[in-house]
Amino acid sequence: MRPSLVIVGAGPRGTGLLERIAANAPELYAGSGLDLHLVDPHPPGAGRIWRADQSPLLWMNSHAEDVTMFTDETVDMAGPVRPGPTLHEWAGIAGRTFADRRLQGDYLRWVHEQALAALPPGITVHHHPHRAVRVGGPREGRQQVWLEGRDRPLLADLVVLALGHLDAEPDDEQRSLAAYARAHGLVHLPPDFTADSDLTALPAGEPVLVRGFGLAFVDLMVLLTEGRGGRYDGDTYLPSGREPVLYVGSRRGVPYHAKIGYDWTGERPPLPRFLGPAQTAELLARPGGLDFRRDVWPLVEKELGYAHYHRLFTAHPERTALPWTDFEEKYAAGSGADLAALVAAAVPDPRDRLDLAALDRPLDGARYASHEAFQEGLRGYLDADLTRRNDPSYSQDLAVFLGLLSVYGQLVRLGNLGTWWHGFFSYLASGPPAPRLRQMRALSRAGLLRFVGADMTVTAADGVFRAASPTVPGFAVEARALVEARLPEPTVGRARDALLRRLHADGAAETPDGLLRTDPADGRVLDAAGRPHPRRFALGPYTDGRTPGAFTRPRTGGPAFRQNDATARAALAFLRSLAVRAAA
């Protein structure tokens, strides 16, 4: 029998893996036959999230020039670089365009077709438009991949799970809220992909509580305003009369920071500096495992600070009180209170200092006398964020963004760092386009978007949902509808995906936060004893090897590319050894 590889998931991650298989096969698998099975009920390339049948009002949250599916020489990988066009080059649109998701789906389908065409002779691809429901088989033998609606499994020498974002069963709180809604005739929309949610149950003119202020909220906002016939005239929103009134809050109580609106110029910070391969190797070698806050976060904080101050001192020296060489030497040696004193002396304006704790919780300790006063206050916050994120005189913010990418590239190698870091990264570096914040401001002025505050609580009592926040003491709002505006948590134990649940039940290990544990070297699935499965791999956001953002920015090292390449090479080497043994 010919060797067989099954890839479950043919969306962006599966397509990226396919591209790396095509790039590495001439070296590692030339001249041998291989059956490659792609299993996905959704269209190859685009997958579920980037499918064609969704609203054109939904945008990507990255500039078209910052989206690529192709490797470059900055990627630390063993396989060959195979360059290709970014989204803006392929589509012939301006680089700073925020393309709609349907156009990105077209790009992904094209990349998928290019990867198929690049496969060498002898590799035959079979697409199965079904859902995979179970993987079985012995550790040292052929695997069986069972498909929904099929009586016989696919036989596989190797299986790679590239499942992407997954639906999840509700947790205890969500089950309780859903039961209360059913009992009292209320509307409760659990965490979901907003484009898939049925929003028709949210009536015009009625208050709707929304918990979550990230990208899922932006989609909800768009679909319930422009999606219901409203439009913008400059900075003024002209309602259609079909919109509900959204009361939104979250842990931070503010939206994700807007995308930075200017390009890099001049010298880049020499990253990595304090968290690079050597420090990562030292962390991995520590006996007894790692604690993120104790062992890793101090290095992250120092690295981001270094990126920030390198840019400030080299690009805006008039706002500093020391030569860069003096500051750098003392910064490298300093820690704790000494470092804080150094920064205070060398950077006179507090707005030029990096305070990660304040960035993470901008409303900590803030109290407003009234709900209306808070509306004015948060509109001022939006104004300030839009101004700063589009002002190159604060280009140290862009340096911190580059630092975040550098740091994430190292943290991926560590694995099992918890979910807080990914949320912090997304809040600072993966926020919405600036026009979306301007739309929030316009909707607020129109009275259709109301801000609740930080640490928003939701209770179900007296036949309604009620939201409150310590940001506005004494204020509460009641509604008959509650929307959880966030993606389902990518937990293995609560995944609705039958394949992943069965994998977990069969002994695949999970982190304390519920992510599937994988070998950082090549993505093999780990069991509870830390043993990598010789024939099963996993890549994507449900694993502890999750990477930043949905897509890779050109010339930033691309940890997802590195992972794809390592998995492709490990798979091809394994399959080649099988072919050699079979021939012998």
Image (cartoon, rainbow, N blue to C red):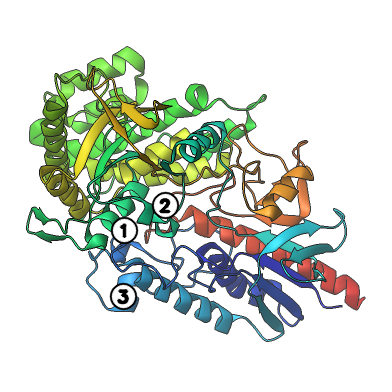
Residue under numbered circle 3: 89
- Tag 2 and tag 1, C-beta contact below 8 Å: yes
Question: How many residues crowd mark 2 within 10 Å: few (<14), some (14–19), many (20+)?
Answer: some
Residue type at mark 1 is Ser
> Which is nearer the eye, 579 or 333?
579
Q: Is residue 118 visible?
A: yes
Residue under numbered circle 2: 549
Residue at the outermost bottom position: 121
* Image location (x, y in percent) of residue 4: 77, 72
The residue at 49%/40% (across/down) is: 182
* Image location (x, y in percent) of residue 270: 33, 44
Mark 2 or 1 closer to N-term?
1
Q: Judge whether 566 appears above or below 170 on screen.
A: below
Q: Marks 1 and 3: which is nearer the front?
A: 1
> Which is nearer the eye, 172 or 240?
240
Residue type at mark 3 is Glu
Residue type at mark 2 is Gly
Name the secondary structure under disc 2: loop
- Distance from disc 2 to disc 3, alpha carbons, whole Å, reads 20 Å
* Image location (x, y in percent) of residue 256: 29, 42
- Distance from disc 2 to disc 1, alpha carbons, whole Å, reads 9 Å
> Which is nearer the eye, 197 or 338?
197
Question: How many residues crowd mark 3 within 10 Å: few (<14), some (14–19), many (20+)?
Answer: some
- Distance from disc 1 to disc 3, alpha carbons, whole Å, reads 14 Å
Q: Marks 2 and 3: which is nearer the front?
A: 2
Mark 2 or 3 closer to N-term?
3
Name the secondary structure under disc 3: helix
Q: Which mark is residue 62?
A: 1
Question: How many residues crowd mark 1 within 10 Å: few (<14), some (14–19), many (20+)?
Answer: many
Tell whether 138 sits left or right of 275.
Answer: right
Q: Is residue 391 visible?
A: no
